[in-house]
Each structure stands twice: as C-alpha cells, then as structure tokens.
Image (spheres, rainbow, N blue to C red):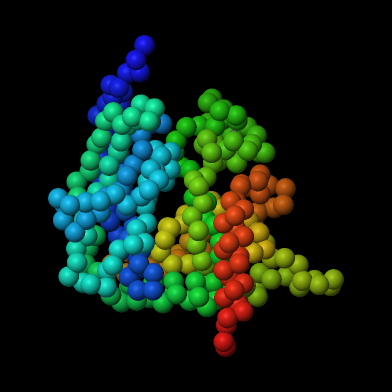
Amino acid sequence: MALSTAARLKRIRFKSVVVIVLSIEHISRILVKWELEPTAQDLRDLKFFIDRGESPNAMAQLNAEPIPASALYEFVDYTANLIDLQKVYYYRVRAVEYRGETPVQTIISAATTPDGDLDFVGLYIVEEHLFAHRWVHGVPAMVFKKRRDGVYCRECWDEVLKRVTKSSCTTCYGTGREGGYYPPIEVWMSFEPDPKVEQVVDWGRRQSTQTDVQFTNYPYLTPDDIIVELKPNRVWKVSNVRGPEKNRTIMLQYLRLDAVNPSDVEQKISVPEDRRVAMVLEAEQRELEREF
Ligand SMILES: [Zn+2]
C-alpha cells in the first residue's frame, strides 16, 4: 500500500510574525517570533523554516535544521548586516507538514520587516552590555525556558487535581508539561554577588542561595525559567525579573535567582556536555588574554 501524501492538518494559520532588532554592533541579532492560531491538532509532523530576503519576492532559507513544532517559536538571525542602514530585510516563516520525509503541505506567513523604528540609544545600551558580558566580565550560561503550554505530563499529571503528583518526575521536571523545558539557549550574563545575600559563617563562606544577574534582551526571561551557570555547573531558577525598557522594548534584564537544591529534580536537566565544555573554554581563554 502506498503511503498517503495527503495533508492531515487543517486550517493551520499564522496568528502573528514579529521581527525585532536585538542588536546591531559587535554581534548582530534579529529575533523572529511567530504564533499559530490555536489548534487542538497534533502538530508533530509540522516543521518551521525561516526565510529572509531584501525583497519579499526573493527570499532564501536561513535555518539548516528545521524547527520542530514542539520548540520555542523563535529564531535568532545572527547573519544580517544591519550596518548598512539602507538595507531592509524581509522575513517570513514557512510551516511545512511532512509525511515521513515528504512535504505534503506548506503554509507561508506574510513577509514582515523589523517592527518599529530603530531606537539607537536603546540599541547602544544593549550592545555595550552584550559586548561586556561576552568579552569582559560575563560568564557563559544556558537558559532553559519553561514550557507553559503543550501536552500535560503522561507520568505524573493528575487530570482531576490539575497538578503534578511526583516531585521527582524527570518527564516534566515538576512543570506538569511533557519535557518540562525547551532546549537550552546559550548566553553570556553577568553574575553580581550581593553582599547582603552572601552568608559568612564561622567555618567559612557558605554558598549563597540567591544571586543577582545582569542580562541583555534575549531571551526574555520569566519566573521559573532555569539558568545553568556553566563553569561551576550551578543550577538556578529565575525568581523575578525587572529592568529598564525604552519604547516598551526591553533593553536590560535584572534577574534575581534562587539556587536549586542539590536534591531537586531540576538538577537532572540535561546540559549538552560538548557545548558546556566549549563555552567554559572560551571563557577561560578570555581570562588568559585579558590585558587589564
Ligand atoms: Zn511529570
């Protein structure tokens, strides 16, 4: 029997595609975020591709690896040249339904340009901090955004009580959603030891259970997201976020983090070891090169 190549998904539509310039200098970053109209269908055969072009009629695909429907609906383009201010980039998102390896249906969003006017003061502030965190005093970390929707945990979600029933569940890590957290996003951020929370006791300095972090504008963090500080391999949970905005755009994020207890299930969240080693090495090489 031949495999059917008929599309299974119906009425998949883009609700929005938003393009935001996060920074231009030192490191160029353009964020593309999208949303689908709500659907109860199983989206496991749907994958996303991001296209960019200087004209909506001439676009090329940016991501080599398709983005699965279970991922965060975000993509950061690091390859745009924004120094040339005459240049306008158009972005669009394609949702492709597959049957096995075969694409059977494609839904294309409208082409979108970056939102709003570029705010040069805001961008300057972000870029200076981004540079400082990467090259001067930040440390490498991985951000695990908490899943706030998707399938409930098959291991421990109680449909009646509407809560998790296992504190040590490694299917949802206590979040109640399958997988618990999205795949990690690599970042550089500045940990600021706060003397008020550093406890000095008779037998030496105890590890503080809270810390403050200064971070730039991507990804946006919200309480309960997980941050793994890679060099000491410490796991933190975001407790609150505040920070200056300009034209309602976040520039900097000041995070208060709580240390995750050694016995808590969040300690079992898997950090890709090859990337951890590579980023720690980058940080150590920067320390050696430092000239001041
Ligand atoms: Zn669970």
Identify the residue at horizontal 68%, vertical 47% (top origin). Answer: 264
Q: Quadrant of residue 83?
A: bottom left
Residue 135 in the image: state x and y as whole percent. Answer: 50, 75
Identify the residue at horizontal 39%, vertical 69% (top origin). Answer: 27
Q: Is residue 3 visible?
A: yes
Most foreground residue, 227 or 63: 63
Q: Is residue 59 left or right of residue 133?
A: left
Q: Quadrant of the N terminus?
A: top left
Q: Is residue 190 left or right of residue 109?
A: right
Q: Quadrant of residue 31?
A: bottom left
Q: Is residue 207 left or right of residue 192?
A: right
Most foreground residue, 211 or 125: 125
Identify the residue at horizontal 58%, vertical 70% (top origin). Answer: 283
Most foreground residue, 275 or 179: 275
Up/down of 183 relative to 219, above or below: above
Q: Furthest-top residue in view?
A: 1
Residue 96 in the image: state x and y as whole percent. Answer: 30, 36
